[in-house]
Image (cartoon, grey):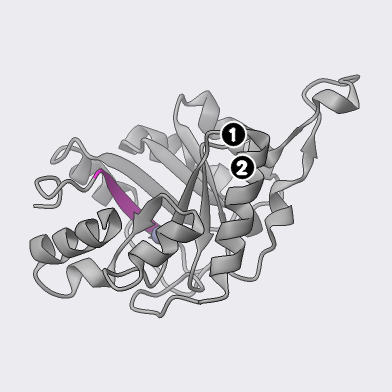
Amino acid sequence: ILEKEGVEYLHIDVMDGMFVPNISLGLPVIKSLRKETEALFDVHLMIEEPGRYIDDFAEAGADLITLHAEATKHLHRAIQQVKAKGLKVGVALNPATPLSALDYVVAINPGTPVSQLECVLDLVDMVLIMTVNPGYGGQSYIAKMDDKIKELRAIINEKGLDIDIEVDGGISAKNVAHVKECGANVFVAGSAVFNGDIASSAKDILEAMEA
Ligand code: ZN
């Protein structure tokens, strides 16, 4: 249904009951969904130390894997693991996590000149700004996140990077145009789509997005 309405990504929330209190679907469900659709699988890992499972999610059919900066002690390594699988990689930030989590400088090789050091932002295809605290559906968009999205868009533009800004949490037909104006370009809608007629809800959001 959603593919027909022009939805490009299937955003799949994976929760482990540790990083977030809730537990949600895992590998077997993703594997069986993969057989049903050609949609891009955008797998949002809300799990502790996601590096442990990257190979498994890649095998299950993920196209893009998003890791939480807060969930791993080795963000750079986990990003490299996703890239090594040939997949796109995203980094997610909880509402309370500052954008500076994307600044950490990474040495490519020992002896790399300072001017050539990369930061996390240089390595990712997408940044996911959580616009609610992760763990449960049906929460309201945190208005303060407007500033964070605007600031990130300004940084990306200034650096001339080609990085998507995805927003997740409380997105509906009512606020999607506003959030787009702040600088986001990938929108996750959960409750707003699935608590009602799926096709018409998705259509409403897509129309509001284009308006
Ligand atoms: Zn999500």
Which one is nearer the viewer's eye here, 54 or 153?
Answer: 153
Q: Is residue 73 left or right of residue 136?
A: right
Q: Is residue 140 left or right of residue 125?
A: left
The residue lying at 31 percent from left, 42 percent from top is: 41
The residue lying at 57 percent from left, 75 percent from top is: 144
Q: Which mark is residue 156?
A: 2
Q: Are marks 2 and 1 in contact (CB under 8 Å)?
A: yes
The residue lying at 16 percent from left, 37 percent from top is: 35
**Residue 147 versus residue 184 in the image, above or below:** below
Tell me where residue 14 sits by quadrant: bottom left
What separation in Å lies between label 2 and label 1 (alpha carbons)?
5 Å
Which one is nearer the viewer's eye here, 178 or 55?
Answer: 178
Magenta-colored span: 8-13
**Circle 1 sits on which residue?**
161
Tell me which amino acid carries mark 1: Leu
Kindly tell me whether residue 43 is visible in this rendering: yes
98 magenta-colored: no
